[in-house]
Image (cartoon, rainbow, N blue to C red):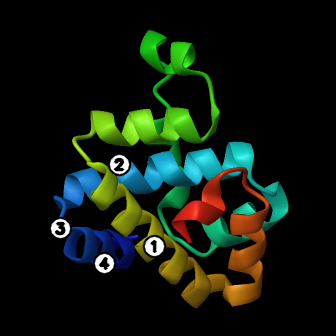
Amino acid sequence: MDELIGRLATKAGIDSVVAEKTIGIVLGFLRNEGPSDKVQALIDQIPGAEAAIAASNSNSGLSRLMGGGLMALGTKLMALGLGMNEIQNVARELFRFGRDKIGADKMGEIISGTPGLSQFA
């Protein structure tokens, strides 16, 4: 997890605390919206990922009102102070990291199997 946090903080130009929260939010989104078996294979390759997902799952009233999907993901990330450019950089770096961990084919299946995600690939 530390490796991924460091990569995100550097590549996206964000604080490491925000990077960790972002990872939890994005992995939680992928778990809910993507092909579950392939997403779980990715999560299993990232030590600390389960804890980050759990920490990001604070189901506040606002989170429940937002619903799910890509729009809710964007709203949660913007609430952390990320702009659209930073969100795109985060997504690209997460996909790069995923390809390193589980291979390009499996990461491609996650991207294509998650509604709306291919625009960030």
How packed mark 4 is, by other alpha carbons closer than 10 Å (few <14, some 14-19, many 20 or more), is some
How packed mark 1 is, by other alpha carbons closer than 10 Å (few <14, some 14-19, many 20 or more), is some
Q: Which badge, 3 or 4, comes first in the chain's sequence?
A: 4
Which residue carries the number 2 mark?
21
Can residue 51 be seen by looking at this rendering? Answer: no
Q: Which residue is drawn at 27% across and 40% down?
A: 80
For badge 2, the amino acid type reads: Lys
Q: What element carries label 1?
A: helix
Between the C-alphas of marks 3 and 4, the distance is 9 Å
Q: Which residue is drawn at 44% across and 41% down?
A: 74
Q: Measured along the vertical axis of the image, is residue 36 above or below residue 90? A: above
Mark drawn on residue 92: 1
State left or right for residue 104 relative to residue 94.
right
Q: Which badge, 3 or 2, comes first in the chain's sequence?
A: 3
Which residue carries the number 3 mark?
13
Q: Is mark 4 on a helix, strand or loop?
A: helix
Q: Position of residue 69 (x, y in %)?
A: 64, 37
Q: Measured along the vertical axis of the image, is residue 100 above or below residue 80? A: below
For badge 3, the amino acid type reads: Gly
